[in-house]
């Protein structure tokens, strides 16, 4: 069933392109061009388009207020970050370059869809609105709405949801080899729940992920069991012909709705949930709320209690002690072995040699470091950055000795 026929057969004109686009960007470009002209003419500088273009992307950005939506509901999205956003707390501004990178995802989608249209598959119902569920917001029912990318009809006339994502090379490789994109799959589930109200026979979806760097694709072919809230990814298929097994995920819809409700509850109570990610994790390092989160965490941390019963993690604590001890002893042995190799090589005055099929080489490298004693204190203060680090310490004298003996006997 075609809900909304697509009439697009070629790429749309670039947003802001042509004469219209030039007029649109005039207020942003002119000051930079004038400044660039002045710099080039009178200062010997050379400000060019490359320096201007990302700043324009920065000017173009819009601040989105928080709204419960399918793209925010996945399990990997930090709930504490969502709570900051929902409570109107401002995070660090998104870098201009990242904004430009995010904007080109739509271009990749258009390009992919244009290619699909030239195949035997039909695309339709693009950007159709769906109602994916309900939560309470300010004590009143609030409908979670979303917009699907489109529906795709195959040669047999079967309709499926098609969701497109364009991502960087690193994340793509991750999904290609082992990991499942749970946030995207959750979004797919929410859309399917919305879609089935309009087109009851749809229960399958294709999540198509494009590698922006290499133009490779990954297809996650999914079936959703609405009654049991169970998403089955049948298979992951790469455009290079490689395939890997799928997996089954239970409860994605339920946990998405309860997450969005939890954000609302915290918003109304003006509270925050615990950190979803550890200090120093890549998620926190890339998070716009990092500074706010760390400083409020200091306060929370000071109110934590001491002397709690942690017997439920007894096994993990023992593993930690054992592994820490093992690491210390192997590091020491490794240093000794390294010294022994270097000693022999220096005695032979060689910097490369062979031993039982192994190529052993020694090189001299220069590494740069700052001599802080030479930096004036006022400059040092300005450039020094304070970061929060969580330090875990496990001490148990008797257990340590016992373990040392155990490990020593291995
Ligand atoms: S800094 Fe980490 S824990 Fe805090 S909001 Fe960001 S991602 Fe979440």
Image: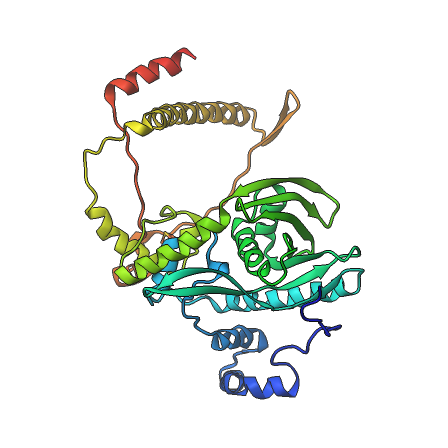
Colour convention of the picture: rainbow
Please give the name of the residue rendered at 63% of the width and 52% of the height, measured from the top-left corner: 203
Picture quarter with the N terminus:
bottom right
Please give the name of the residue rendered at 35% of the width and 24% of the height, measured from the top-left corner: 315
Picture quarter with the C terminus:
top left
**Relative height, residue 290 to residue 396 (above, below):** below
User: Residue 275: image x %, image y %?
Assistant: 34, 49
User: Residue 107: image x %, image y %?
Assistant: 64, 68
Q: Which image quadrant for residue 242?
A: top right
User: Residue 119: image x %, image y %?
Assistant: 80, 61
One can see residue 76 in this view: no
**Relative height, residue 208 to residue 407 (above, below):** below
Q: Nearer the viewer, residue 396 or 372?
A: 396
User: Residue 16: image x %, image y %?
Assistant: 60, 81
**Relative height, residue 294 to residue 310 (above, below):** below
Q: Which image quadrant for residue 348?
A: top right
């Amino acid at each position: 069933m075609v809900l909304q026929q697509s009439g697009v057969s070629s790429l749309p004109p670039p947003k802001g392109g042509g004469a219209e686009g030039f007029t649109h960007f005039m207020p942003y470009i002119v000051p930079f061009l004038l400044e660039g002209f002045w710099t080039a003419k009178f200062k010997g500088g050379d400000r060019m388009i490359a320096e201007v273009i990302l700043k324009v992307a920065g000017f173009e950005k819009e601040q989105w207020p928080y709204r419960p939506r399918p793209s925010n509901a996945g399990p990997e999205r930090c709930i504490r970050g969502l709570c900051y956003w929902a409570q109107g707390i401002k995070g660090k501004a998104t870098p201009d370059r990242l904004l430009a990178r995010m904007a080109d995802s739509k271009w990749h989608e258009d390009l992919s869809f244009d290619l699909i249209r030239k195949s035997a598959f039909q695309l339709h119902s693009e950007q159709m609105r769906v109602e994916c569920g309900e939560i309470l917001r300010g004590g009143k029912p609030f409908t979670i709405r979303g917009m699907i990318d489109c529906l795709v009809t195959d040669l047999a006339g079967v309709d499926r949801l098609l969701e497109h994502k364009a991502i960087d090379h690193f994340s793509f490789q991750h999904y290609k080899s082992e990991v499942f994109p749970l946030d995207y799959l959750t979004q797919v589930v929410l859309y399917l729940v919305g879609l089935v109200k309009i087109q009851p026979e749809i229960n399958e979806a294709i999540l198509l992920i494009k590698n922006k760097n290499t133009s490779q694709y990954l297809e996650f072919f999914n079936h959703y069991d609405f009654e049991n809230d169970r998403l089955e990814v049948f298979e992951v298929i790469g455009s290079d012909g490689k395939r890997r097994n799928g997996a089954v995920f239970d409860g994605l819809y339920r946990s998405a709705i309860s997450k969005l409700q939890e954000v609302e509850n915290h918003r109304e109570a003006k509270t925050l949930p615990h950190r979803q990610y550890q200090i120093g994790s890549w998620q926190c390092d890339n998070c716009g709320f990092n500074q706010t989160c760390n400083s409020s965490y200091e306060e929370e941390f000071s109110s934590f209690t001491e002397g709690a019963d942690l017997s439920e993690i007894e096994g993990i604590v023992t593993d930690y002690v054992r592994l820490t001890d093992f690491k210390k002893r192997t590091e020491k042995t490794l240093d000794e072995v390294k010294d022994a190799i270097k000693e022999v090589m220096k005695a032979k005055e060689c910097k490369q040699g062979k031993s039982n099929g192994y190529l052993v080489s020694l090189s001299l490298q220069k590494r740069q470091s700052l001599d802080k004693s030479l930096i004036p204190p006022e400059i040092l203060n300005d450039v020094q950055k304070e970061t929060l680090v969580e330090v875990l310490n496990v001490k148990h004298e008797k257990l340590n000795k016992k373990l040392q003996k155990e490990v020593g006997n291995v």
